[in-house]
Image (cartoon, rainbow, N blue to C red):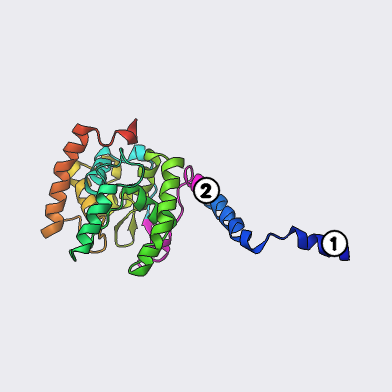
Amino acid sequence: MARTARSSKRRKLPWYLRPLKWLLWFAVVTVLWVLIYRIVPPPVTFTMLADSNGITKDWTSLSNIDRNMVRAVIAAEDGKFCSHNGFDADAIEQAIERNAKGKRMRGGSTISQQTAKNVFLWQGSGWTRYLRKVPEVYFTFLIEHLWGKRRIMEVYLNVAETGIGTYGVEAGAQRYFKHGAATLNPEEAARIAAILPLPKKRAAISPSGFTRRYGNTIRARIGQVRRDGLDGCVYD
């Protein structure tokens, strides 16, 4: 018994190596989590669970989502989606400068970062928003390397909040236009993209003020995304 007790003590890791053990477990679990979602649609997210308005969603493969919708979110959210590795340094720098000047807060997150946040993390505000940034970078790195651009876009378009208690562009299209995402025209796609930053406060039907102007701008940019092939990585 004494010998067994002594050998048990010898097997224990030194205290200073224990954090490495937990980091290794964290890496294994999170990589497996990301790999599962490479194939399996995320069943629910923390944002959905925290929504007191309930959850209306309908997972739809990218092949059943009109290309206008893909072009609209690239035009609105991330014009460099196909050329960056998950992070847009210029956009981040501009956001920091703008926020430092006390102007309206605006993030520099890419579609990849937003997907990582929406699927694996929480929304947050104040200091919790900044606390989220470190794991957000980590998960963005993982999905960029383990999923690829097409899967990132597919997941993003299915988990993004598109209205009160509404998630994904299929549910959004049904809510606002009474038809599926497969037949969204450029104007409809632009309207959905225009409300993504504030889906609980902006209207896709008969928009007014900033939302209407922003939607018109996105509508015009859809043509530029098409001409310049800025959505090519999603379909190649």
Q: Is residue 126 magenta?
A: no
Q: Which residues are magenta?
A: 33-56
Residue 158 disc label: none
* Residue at point 34%, 53% (across, down): 114
Tell me which corner region of the image, top left, top right, bottom left or bottom right, holds residue 233. top left
Quarter that holds the N terminus: bottom right
Separation of marks 2 and 1 at Cα, in angstroms: 36 Å
Measured as percent of width and height from the top left, residue 159 is found at 37, 52
Q: Which element type, helix, strand or loop, lies under badge 2? A: helix
Q: Amino acid at mark 1?
A: Thr
Measured as percent of width and height from the top left, residue 46 is found at 43, 61
Tell me which corner region of the image, top left, top right, bottom left or bottom right, holds residue 104. bottom left
Q: Mark 2 — residue? A: 31
* Residue at point 69%, 59% (across, down): 13
Q: Mark 1 — residue? A: 4
Count the marks: how many? 2
Q: Which element type, helix, strand or loop, lies under badge 1? A: helix
